[in-house]
Image: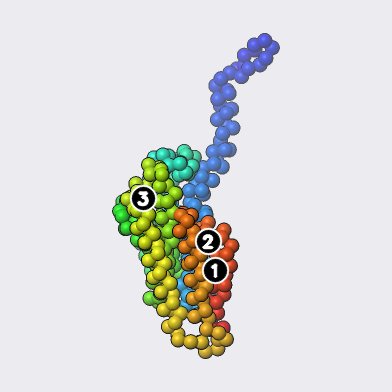
Amino acid sequence: MTERTSGAVLLDKPAVVRERRRARVPWAVVAVPAGLLRTARPRQWVKNVLVVAAPVAAGQLVSWHTAARLALVFALFTAAASAVYLVNDARDADADRAHPVKCRRPVAAGLVPVPLAYATGILLGLGAAVAGAVLCNPMTAALLVAYLVMQGAYCLRLKHVLVVDLAVVTTGFLMRAMIGGVALGIPLSRWFLITTGFGALFMVAAKRYSEAVQLEGARGATRALLTQYTTGYLRFVWQLAAGVAVLGYCLWALESGGVAHGSLLPWRQLSVIAFILAVLRYAVFADRGTAGAPEDVVLRDRPLAVIGVAWAAMYGMAVTDL
């Protein structure tokens, strides 16, 4: 139906509404999957590169079979971590809307419906656990399930418990570092676990410290638990963790006692220099209160990247006895 007014042709209102709704369909089809992808935190996937830590530490990253298995484990842990992000954002949607930055998250902004975020997260988590059991081994699946259960408890309750929240996030990083060794049946040394665990605690506490410093004047706009920590306490935690991580690495490096057979130089011992420099460089950002996004610090700071490459080269020579 149309209506003529002064020579102009006007569409009736129901037709206009129908046309607008049809025009919005392609936008929704694109916006919802894009919102789900954003909620899965692609920038955080770099953390899952830790799955190669145990095989690299054991000097067993040399075959196509190992590389293929680690790529699979990376994908499984990425799916599990994304599942946690989706469920967490769905649960915290109301609180995130009151946050100056988190209100832009797709679930909080209304781009992704809360039920859809829950359903996608649950499916991803179950799929990762089942695929781990079928394609890897039972221990890999068990570790993925333990990670999902722990992170679920964190979302529901543990994120509000002092100190325990730091321990849970740190354990999540440690599980990432362990799962590559578990999937390949590689024994995990005590020095590897100590250095990785306290290195993770260093970064987690530095992140919390940075958040506390940056949001000190806007306490109502951040998580309630953060207001219960003092900046002095969080500084103490990241400094203590950094010290223990360095000590654990030094003990590993000095364990061999000298130049390995067939090596030109004592690469294990020399790698200590690069490791300590990397910790000191990262501590600069922690001390400034700008380590709130560890992935940005690691990927964007060129001196830290150069130090990391130098450490990786020396470490690789150490574990391969070159």
Q: Residue at x 44, y 77 (%)?
A: 250
The crowd level at tag 1 (other Cα within 10 Å; few <14, some 14-19, many 20+) is: some
Q: Nearer the viewer, residue 284 or 193?
A: 284
**Along the horizontal axis of the image, is 170 left or right of 271?**
left
Q: Mark 1 or mark 3, which has the lower sequence index?
A: 3
Residue 82 percent location from the top left of the image: 46, 54
The amino acid type of the residue labelled 2 equals Val
Between the C-alphas of marks 1 and 2, the distance is 9 Å
The amino acid type of the residue labelled 3 equals Leu
| Residue 308 image label | 1
Q: Which residue is mark 2?
A: 298
Marks 1,2: beta carbons within 8 A: yes
| Residue 226 image label | 3
Residue 267 percent location from the top left of the image: 53, 81
Residue 150 percent location from the top left of the image: 34, 58
The amino acid type of the residue labelled 1 equals Gly
State the SS at label 2: helix
State the SS at label 1: helix
Between the C-alphas of marks 2 and 3, the distance is 24 Å
Q: Residue at x 57, y 58 (%)?
A: 300
Vertical order, 245 against 79 (above or below): below
The crowd level at tag 3 (other Cα within 10 Å; few <14, some 14-19, many 20+) is: some
Work out which residue is located at the far bottom of the displayed protein and give it: 261
- Quarter of the rendering occupied by the C terminus: bottom right
